[in-house]
Image: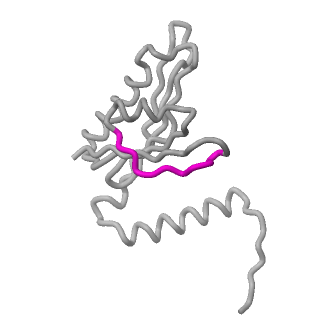
Amino acid sequence: MSKGNITPSTAQDSAYVRQQLVAYNAAHVSNELKNRYEELNFNIKNEAGEIVAGVLSTLCWNWIELDILWVDSAQRHRGYGSQLLLEVECLAREKDCDFIMLNTFSYQAPEFYKKHGYQLITTIENAPRGHHHYYFKKDLT
């Protein structure tokens, strides 16, 4: 068996690998879903125009993956996180998504997501060390 040369990837190399996987995946997904990819990113600004909360999410095929939900520590408990989460959920329904999935850590907001109807799928312990990494899903259908 011959072995290839392993080298660090350039940005162009990484883009090529990503494109190859996207093409492979597209061959296995229905035509109605194959081109459904959209970033859904929003923020909340204070009176001074500073971002105090934001969400980064991606619509992919028939679901939305919530990547980041952040609220400035001085602005917490004002409903900003809930407002952003509900906006993503509303868009997911409008775009005919079946579910939303996300991950969070034990020191972040697992109880917040449970309060909003997200179901724990799995837990990875000691990730990072001394903490837990949780994966959640909320069915929309």
x, y percentage for residue 75? 52, 14
Which segment is the magenta one? 118-128
Q: Residue at x 56, y 8 (%)?
A: 48
x, y percentage for residue 14? 65, 60
Placement of the N terminus among the 4 image quadrants: bottom right
Camera-nearest residue between 85 and 111: 111
Q: Residue at x 44, y 41 (%)?
A: 66
x, y percentage for residue 73? 58, 18
Q: Quadrant of residue 61?
A: bottom left
x, y percentage for residue 88? 36, 34
Q: Would you say residue 25 sits in the magenta stretch?
A: no
Q: Residue at x 50, y 17 (%)?
A: 76
Q: Is residue 12 left or right of residue 30?
A: right
Q: Residue at x 33, y 29 (%)?
A: 86
Which colour style is shown?
Answer: one colour
Give the main secondary structure of the magenta stretch.
strand
